[in-house]
Image (spheres, rainbow, N blue to C red):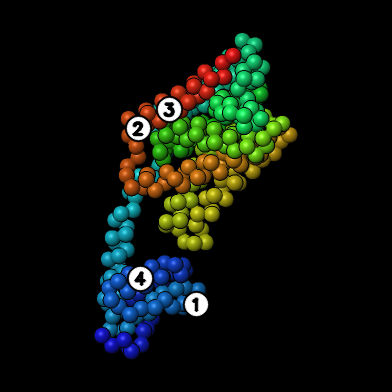
């Protein structure tokens, strides 16, 4: 091999706007034993090789792209998947259960009592009453509050169900909502209390954003990468939960953050295998329901 032969750019070799991608190509060719370097041509990056190695380099990169595409998700993490009619109906029923619970407490004259035992009081949560981070998700100040959270909750729950299944979507609501409320309590520590499902609703937004961010990081050009999805999540919080005298913006942002981290954590395993089936969905649903029930059981007088 004559290492002194000049390296040239050839139109048969691919180019990209991402320097990191060109560096990956260079590593592939180096592994094949080819002299190579990354070269910038105008706004693009490509690889330069010896004239005699162009055909071999092009074939190696084509094979590498083909092999890489073969291991990418095909049915798991289907970004544009939609929920089934059954999942949509169950998502709406789950959201409306919040309204039914609120109306039941109002008619029984127990709303103030349950709020006292279940609201996310920062000082009490910091003192160890962690169940309040979950019970607060089921309480609302009035019917308008409950209806608003039910409407948006059903929408985002169905959207997430189309990607990971309804059981996991409900578990995501509970987990991200609880973590968001916990972070909010630790942030304020004293003199602050909240109720409402909105922390969990924005947790669902965060999971959707996290899943989309991972996918965009894998497939989209750098200028339209992961930050676009995460920015969209922030925009939704700003539009739906960022204004109003009684709006707890910090809780919404903590819910979004918890959801985004959960989405990123779920993205990789979901990309390697099909969407979890009925057994996993049922187990996740049972976990979500049992967590809320246990939290209220611990809040009993």
Image marks 3 and 4: residues in contact by CB distance under 8 Å: no
Residue 249's x, y, as percent? 66, 39
Q: CA distance from mark 3 to mark 1?
A: 55 Å
Q: Which residue is mark 2?
A: 280
Residue 27's tag is: 4
At x 53% / y 20%, what residue is drawn? 298
Mark 2 touches mark 4? (CB < 8 Å): no
Residue 8 located left or right of residue 250: left
Q: Say whether disc 3 or disc 1 marks the residue closer to the N-terminus.
A: 1
Above or below: residue 69 compared with residue 105? below
Instruction: Give the total of numbered labels.
Output: 4
SS type, badge 4: helix
Q: CA distance from mark 1 to mark 4?
A: 22 Å
The residue carrying pointer 2 sits among few (fewer than 14), some (14 to 19) or many (20 or more) residues within 10 Å by Cα, namely some
The mark closer to the camera, 2 or 1, is 2
Query: Quick one: 301 or 57, which is closer to the camera?
Result: 301
State left or right for residue 168 relative to residue 123.
left
* Residue carrying label 3: 287
Answer few, some or many: residues within 10 Å of disc 1's Cα (few below 14, many 20 plus, some between 14 and 19). Answer: few
User: Which mark identifies residue 42?
Assistant: 1
């Amino acid at each position: 091999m004559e290492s002194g032969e000049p390296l040239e750019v050839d139109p048969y070799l691919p180019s990209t706007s991402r320097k990191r991608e060109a560096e990956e190509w260079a590593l592939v060719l180096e592994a094949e034993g080819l002299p190579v370097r990354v070269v910038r041509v105008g706004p693009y990056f490509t690889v330069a090789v010896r004239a005699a190695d162009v055909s071999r380099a092009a074939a190696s990169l084509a094979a590498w792209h083909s092999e890489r595409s073969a291991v990418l998700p095909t049915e798991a993490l289907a970004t544009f998947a939609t929920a089934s009619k059954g999942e949509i109906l169950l998502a709406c029923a789950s959201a409306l259960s919040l309204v039914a619970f609120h109306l039941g407490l109002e008619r029984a004259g127990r709303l103030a009592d349950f709020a006292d035992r279940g609201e996310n009081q920062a000082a009490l949560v910091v003192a160890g009453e962690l169940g309040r981070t979950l019970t607060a998700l089921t309480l609302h100040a009035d019917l308008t509050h409950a209806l608003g959270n039910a409407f948006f909750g059903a929408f985002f729950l169905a959207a997430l169900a189309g990607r990971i299944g309804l059981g996991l979507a409900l578990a995501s609501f509970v987990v991200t909502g609880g973590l968001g409320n916990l972070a909010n309590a630790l942030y304020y520590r004293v003199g602050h209390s909240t109720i409402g499902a909105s922390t969990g609703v924005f947790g669902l937004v965060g999971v959707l954003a996290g899943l989309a961010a991972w996918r965009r990081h894998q497939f989209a050009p750098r200028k339209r990468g992961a930050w676009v999805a995460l920015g969209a999540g922030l925009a939704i919080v700003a539009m739906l939960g960022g204004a109003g005298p009684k709006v707890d913006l910090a809780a919404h942002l903590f819910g979004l953050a918890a959801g985004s981290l959960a989405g990123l954590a779920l993205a990789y395993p979901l990309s390697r295998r099909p969407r979890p089936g009925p057994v996993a969905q049922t187990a996740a649903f049972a976990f979500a329901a049992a967590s809320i029930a246990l939290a209220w059981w611990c809040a009993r007088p």
